[in-house]
């Protein structure tokens, strides 16, 4: 290799090292995203693949068949007593696969004793005193059904068919005693056990409109596929609040041949009966347990419902679902655990929900999911409102060890989370989809995988005050949202106490006490954020390979290091010098050809 080639190669090596040093200095010292961006993106996994082991097509068809059966019963109820002279009181319809016992309105409630008398072959007593119901029951408007007074009610549920109890516009009472709850469950007479298979349908109970009174009862292994057939379903039906004006009763005389004139009182009475069938469901569920149902407890179109001191466990889909149009409802001292999906769900168009001292743990998706988004974004065929929903409070509750988020608030307004313990999960609380007026006060959040609180996608006017956030990578991650983060305590933070990304106009981070060992306490890569008067005495950067590399990766330091490396490389790669040669090898010194000067005596001896 010539000297010119060696010089060119060395020059190129110097240029490459200097460029690498410059780039490294920018990357490690001025990367605006860093760890907080890479790890701050919580996934919006909307998947509902819950591992449901049923048969989708068969179960959906069974739900449709159940709707048709109940519709047939209600249709015949209005005309059959008039068309059949022998039908008075309760009657049975030959529906498939099981017969349906129809209970019309009467003053006194229908009791278990009454049911056995009305259908002695299908409603029987087992040796242990439990009642086996082998046909379906439908209670019509203004009829009341009382299942109390027995140790257990077992609803037949076999591959050939399943029994159900549907109360339409009437009342249902299920009451045991303290320490001796009334058990209501599916039952397969062939196996003598509960039915745990949903593929061929499963026994269920539904109250449509009317009222419910449940106390000290245990519901197990009921329901399949849909909310209305999901186990115990409390659903109402939308009724109009307005009635058309009626004319004053006419005093004109009518001939015998004229069509009869229905009086306003008769019209009003008929509308009252219709309202009883179509109104919201209401009532109380206290000291109840729900185990292994498809939906633990499913509620829709309800008003003034109270659920307290109850336990929902092992639901195949979601635990406690407030689906649509649920208002003025209170959940207190209730535990929801081990659901395949969400623990508690508050669906769209539901509002004025209070959750006090609830425990939500070990569910397969979110602990509590609140969806307050509007039903429509503009003109729509259903005429739905574009307003969002909210007025939801979670107080003194424990939400822990749920697989995804502790609480997810999507698009809702006026949501309060206070004095609660939220632990583990990917994120403690997620506020997204333009949710607004969300406050978090006095909570303890810890041991989340990514962040304690994540605000994103247009969330606004979020208040985060007087909380304790600990043992987490990032305390609050804010991306295109606004919040007032004030007077909180951050402890044992390993990345950032607060991260701001995107647009954060109006966001204030003030008066917080921050302790941890992350790269920076407040990572601000947003437009409009403001941080001041935060106590950072407990904050120190960690000694990690990354921090050491960041300290070393100064451009000038890397240049001098590169030059030193270059000197070493040059010393190791230069060619070795050849040995010194005599310039005139053919000229041999005389001393090499003779012995040099010798004494004369030595020469005389040799002669």
Image (cartoon, rainbow, N blue to C red):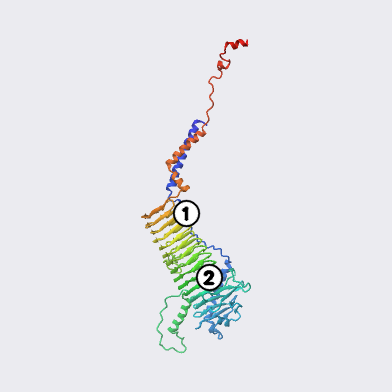
- For the residues labelled 1 and 2, the Cα–Cα distance comes to 38 Å
- Residue 411 coordinates in the image, percent (x, y): 43, 63
Q: In terms of image quadrants, where is residue 126? A: bottom right
Mark earlier in primary sequence (1, 2): 1
- Image coordinates of residue 257 in percent, x first then y, are 47, 88
Does residue 503 appear anywhere in the picture? no
Which of the image's four quarters has the C terminus?
top right
Which residue is situated farthest in the left direction here? 533
Residue 326, given in percent of the width and then of the height, sits at: 45, 71
Q: Is residue 164 visible?
A: yes
Q: Which mark is residue 290?
A: 2
Residue that lies at the very extreme toward the right in this rendered image: 190
How many marks the image carries: the answer is 2
Mark 2 Cα-neighbour bin, 10 Å: few <14, some 14–19, many ≥20: many
Q: Please name whichever residue, 21 or 249, is drawn nearer the observer in this view of the structure.
A: 21
Q: Nearer the viewer, residue 433 or 510?
A: 510
Q: Secondary structure at mark 2?
A: strand
Residue under numbered circle 1: 39
Secondary element at tag 1:
helix
Please rate how many residues cluster around mark 1, counting C-alpha atoms within 10 Å: few if below 14, some from 14 to 19, many from 20: some
In the rendered structure, find residue 501 and report the number of the disc placed on it. Answer: none
- Number of the front mark, 1 or 2: 2
């Amino acid at each position: 290799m010539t000297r010119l080639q060696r010089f060119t190669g060395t020059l190129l090596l110097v240029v490459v090292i200097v460029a690498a040093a410059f780039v490294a200095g920018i990357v490690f010292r001025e990367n605006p995203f860093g760890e907080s961006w890479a790890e701050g993106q919580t996934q919006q996994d909307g998947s509902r693949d819950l591992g449901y082991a049923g048969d989708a097509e068969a179960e959906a068809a069974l739900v449709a068949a159940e709707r048709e059966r109940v519709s047939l019963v209600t249709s015949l109820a209005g005309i059959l007593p008039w068309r059949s002279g022998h039908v008075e009181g309760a009657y049975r319809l030959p529906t498939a696969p099981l017969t349906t016992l129809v209970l019309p309105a009467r003053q006194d409630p229908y009791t278990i004793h009454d049911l056995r008398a009305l259908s002695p072959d299908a409603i029987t007593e087992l040796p242990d005193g439990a009642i086996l119901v082998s046909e379906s029951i439908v209670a019509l408007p203004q009829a009341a059904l009382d299942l109390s007074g027995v140790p257990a009610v077992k609803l037949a549920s076999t591959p050939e068919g399943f029994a159900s109890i549907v109360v339409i516009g009437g009342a249902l009472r299920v009451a045991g005693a303290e320490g001796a709850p009334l058990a209501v469950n599916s039952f397969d007479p062939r196996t003598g056990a509960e039915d745990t298979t949903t593929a061929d349908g499963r026994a269920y109970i539904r109250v449509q409109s009317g009222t419910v009174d449940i106390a000290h009862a245990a519901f197990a292994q009921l329901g399949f596929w849909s909310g209305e057939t999901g186990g115990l379903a409390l659903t109402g039906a939308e009724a109009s609040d307005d009635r058309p004006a009626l004319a004053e009763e006419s005093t004109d005389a009518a001939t015998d041949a004229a069509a009869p004139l229905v009086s306003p009182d008769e019209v009003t009475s008929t509308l009252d009966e219709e309202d009883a069938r179509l109104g919201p469901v209401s009532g109380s569920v206290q000291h109840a347990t729900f185990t292994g149902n498809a939906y633990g407890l499913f509620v829709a179109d309800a008003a003034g419902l109270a659920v307290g001191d109850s336990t929902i466990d092992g639901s195949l889909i979601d635990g406690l679902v407030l689906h649509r149009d649920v208002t003025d409802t209170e959940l207190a001292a209730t535990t929801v655990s081990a659901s395949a999906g969400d623990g508690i769900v508050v669906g769209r168009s539901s509002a004025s929900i209070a959750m006090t001292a609830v425990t939500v743990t070990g569910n397969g998706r979110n602990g509590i999911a609140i969806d307050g988004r509007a039903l429509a974004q503009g003109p729509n065929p259903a005429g739905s409102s574009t307003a969002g929903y909210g007025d939801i409070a979670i107080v003194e509750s424990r939400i822990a060890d749920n697989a995804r988020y502790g609480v997810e608030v999507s698009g809702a307004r006026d949501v309060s989370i206070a004095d609660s313990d939220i632990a583990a999960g990917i994120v403690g609380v997620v506020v997204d989809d333009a949710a607004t007026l969300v406050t978090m006060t006095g909570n303890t959040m810890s041991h989340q995988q990514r962040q304690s609180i994540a605000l994103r996608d247009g969330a606004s006017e979020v208040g985060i005050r007087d909380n304790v956030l600990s043992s987490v990578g990032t305390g609050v991650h804010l991306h295109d949202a606004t919040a007032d983060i004030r007077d909180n305590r951050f402890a044992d933070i390993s990345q950032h106490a607060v991260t701001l990304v995107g647009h954060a106009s109006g966001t204030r981070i003030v008066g917080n006490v921050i302790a941890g060992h992350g790269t920076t306490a407040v990572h601000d890569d947003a437009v409009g954020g403001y941080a001041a008067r935060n106590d950072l005495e407990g904050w120190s950067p960690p000694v990690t390979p990354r921090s050491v590399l960041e300290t070393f990766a100064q451009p000038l330091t890397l240049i001098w290091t590169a030059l030193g490396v270059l000197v070493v490389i040059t010393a190791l790669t230069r060619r070795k010098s050849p040995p010194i040669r005599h310039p005139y090898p053919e000229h041999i010194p005389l001393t090499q050809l003779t012995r040099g000067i010798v004494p004369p005596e030595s020469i005389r001896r040799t002669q």
